[in-house]
Image: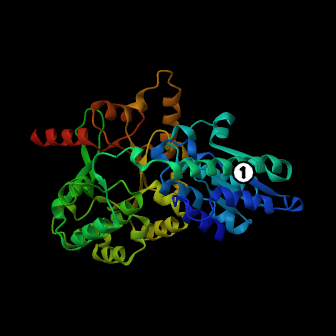
Amino acid sequence: MAMLTQAVQGAGQGTRGPSQEYMLLDYLQRLSRNSLGGRMAVHLHLSRLRPNNRRDHHIRIAAATFEGIVQNYEGQTFILSTSDIFFICKGASLQDIDTAVMKVRFLFSEDPLAQGDDEEDIHKFCTWYNLENQYDDVLEVAKKLHRERERQSRMSATADPKSMPKKSGRRPIEPEQLGKLEQFLARADMSNLMRRQSICAITPGMPPQPVFQELYISIADLQQTMLPEYDIGVNPWLFQHLTQTLDVRMLSLLMKNDDSSIASSFSINLNVSTILSPHFLTFDSSLKAVARGTVVVELQKIDIFGDMGAYVFARDFLRERGYRICLDGLNHLTIQFIDRERLGLDLLKVVWSPDMADDSAGARLADLKQHVDRCGRARIILCRCDSDEAVRFGQSLGITMFQGRYVDKLLTENRRI
């Protein structure tokens, strides 16, 4: 457990203290030959992910996936400077380790590296080792990783700072600016930044029928109004902290709201940590019991799978109080990994993209239909529908609920009739 914590805290910290490559090599060299029985190692090649998918918070969450095995099976996790993860344990079943690896693949399922089920595809994502039979191979890999890390460190030490490329555009937000922003948010009237968008049932030949509406605070407008020279989203940890603050402000807005049109039948995006906070309990007590059954709480998949125990606790609480739960942020590639009923989800949001319809052979479309049927056609919302093509494609899969600018346009046109 201590090693996992050390590895997670060390990610992205540069050259302070011994490198993770050195600690991996040292750990392997300290293992005696007679202690190798039952030890397995997995090398996750996350350095092969696209740059936007291997930011520090992605890698930290991936490493935390092995926490249960670390605690129970003498596990050690090393987060390397390249973003690769090296995991070693003793006595865990292959199924337990494979389950953890598959969870990590799911977290990055939108990246080409994590797609495909052939043996070659899986080998590109990770390499397995049985230390009892492959100790020398693993040791050699660790030595190469350590040598490469040392080489990169020497190159960085001798690099000319003036030759480093300069970034353009908005400056990344820093803790000082975030603190000032949060102070402002605590006393500001946020109602002018709250937006709403309807989720509608649409069947061929019939006008759209609103089912509920999503309420959210516009991050783009907030940034433009408050900090136009800064990029709020560039630092994932600061942005995550900001979303928790916005959660609280949204709940406060809803409690003070006197607009009957959003007194029920709405959805809000929340962090799991917010649901488990006193702020949500206060919001919950302000709702009438009949209204809770019309409220949908939307969660992001990385929040659910980042801490499954916290999610399960929050899920059971929400369901007992009558709320519905929606998993947001899925696409046509990730829906296959979701067992909606087992996760206790009422709804799934799948993001539309033209790639969904780009399937000349028809094989992928057949698979997608199968996944939609398995999850429940009436339980899926196709969102970000900006065109008639999106709605027609969703209807071809049996989906009946849609959200997006094109749906807004249909609603507006229908009101004029």
Q: Is residue 307 visible?
A: yes
Residue 330 vs residue 171: left or right? right
* Depth order, front residue of 73/286: 73
From the image, tell me which residue sits under label 1: 142
What is the quadrant of the C terminus in the image? Answer: top left
User: Residue at point 69% right, 36% down?
Assistant: 119
Q: Nearer the viewer, residue 363 or 22?
A: 22
Picture quadrant where residue 28 is located: bottom right
Question: Is the residue marked by circle 1 packed among few (<14), some (14-19), or many (20+) residues within 10 Å?
Answer: many
Spot occupied by residue 391 in the image (x, y as percentages of width and height): 32, 35
The residue tagged with tag 1: helix, strand or loop?
helix
Q: Quadrant of the N terminus?
A: bottom right
* Residue 166 in the image, given as x and y percentages of width and height: 35, 46
Residue 1 visible somewhere in the drawing? no
The percent coordinates of residue 370 (x first, y second) are 52, 37
Residue at image position (58%, 51%) is 154
Give left or right: position of 65 versus 36.
Answer: left
Quarter of the view holding residue 412: top left
The percent coordinates of residue 269 (x first, y second) are 34, 59
Question: Colour scheme used in the picture?
Answer: rainbow
Q: Quadrant of residue 289?
A: bottom left
